[in-house]
Image (cartoon, rainbow, N blue to C red):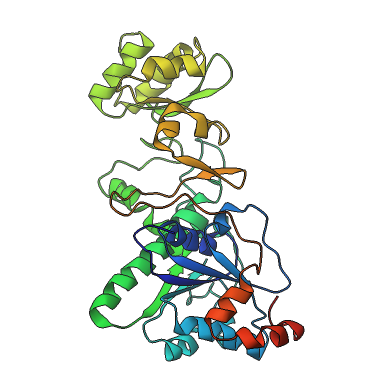
Amino acid sequence: MSGPLQGLTVIELAGLAPAPFAATVLADYGADVVRVERTSVAGAPGDPLARSRRSIAVDTKHPAGVDILLRLVERSDVLIEGFRPGVTERGGYGPAHCLARNPRLVYGRMTGWGQQGPLAPTAGHDIDYIAIAGALEPIGRAGQTPVPPLNLLGDFGGGGLLLATGILAALFERERSGKGQVVDAAMVDGAALLTTFMHGMRAVGMWNGPRGTNLLDGGSPFYDTYETADGKYVAIGALEEKFYQELLTILRFEDVENRMDPSQWPRLRERIGAAVKTKTRDEWAELAAASDACLAPVLTPGEAPSHPHNAERGTFVEVAGVTQPAPAPRFDRTPAATPAAPPRAGQDTDAVLAELGLRDQISDLRKAGTVA
């Protein structure tokens, strides 16, 4: 592996979505991530959220399995877990257990509600976390129900990515103190953090209307999507006046409305919509490509990799036959390598056990069902 985190060792306790995404970010940057799988569960073949790591299968409900995990902790920089509060403590590998074995360890915890609070012990999913964070209610059309933005805000933006950021901050602090610490990343906190800009707009009176009637939520006709002649869509984001004027040039009509007056928005939306309907999505994309009109084609996930801009930048890569986003951001001196294929569950068990000095015990551990 290559990248700015080369030499960093991370333990990932296998889970779903946000915690694996945090581990993927670190692996993309060059960290040696060892994914600890359960002996009875096999990961999905080709899963991009399991790329670029090694995998061992260990039964952490068995004392010998916990011992293996704690041996890993002794030689690692980071541990990532995504269980409900109290699970790792009861299993014997919570923060106190691990930091006792390695005081320099950064212990990253990923939950929906956080480690404390009245909702902490309860179940939930992305949609629930972003709901109480105030991040779901503003998304959607006027007069309609809120629209879940996939699971991008809770699981990934406010979850895994924020956990990775917290881990990196803790590692930086460790360089001064010599001590590790616990990073408590909660999706509700992260989703709330992602709304910081909106709270600023509310404070100055720029976001006071109901859902779907404001500047950035599809309420303004110059920041919205429009259907094209072929039933596809373009996205328009001409917020600044100079960009709006370029949009008018592309659309070939004069501006007769005061675009900053919301009472004029319905009429302006009709005009823009009628103009956009006269050409196909790709015709509009070609017209706008060399301009500052802030008009872009709305691509499907399957189309995005072949867009000329993405193709030239290598924004997507193919790993083990699966097209997926490339590591980001980019580093000029220590670039990330092309991601490696996801491992089979447990494929590196013997090698990792040998690194821990347990080569002579592998056979017995396997017979006991402690490893697989």
Residue at 47 percent across and 77 percent down: it is 116
Report whether 299 appears left or right of 77.
right
Give the percent coordinates (x, y) of residue 10.
Answer: 46, 71
Residue closest to the eye, 367 or 37: 367
Residue 133 makes an appearance in the image: no
Residue 259 makes an appearance in the image: yes
Report whether 306 appears left or right of 309.
right
Give the percent coordinates (x, y) of residue 197.
Answer: 32, 49
Report whether 74 appears left or right of 93.
left
Residue closest to the eye, 123 or 43: 43
Residue 38 image-quadrant placement: bottom right
Give the percent coordinates (x, y) of residue 368.
Answer: 75, 86
Q: Is residue 302 above or below residue 102?
A: above
Residue at 45 percent across and 54 percent down: it is 157
Residue that extends furthest to the front in the rendered view of this protein:
360
Residue at 53 percent across and 36 percent down: it is 143
Task: Specify the quadrant that holds the N terminus.
Answer: bottom left
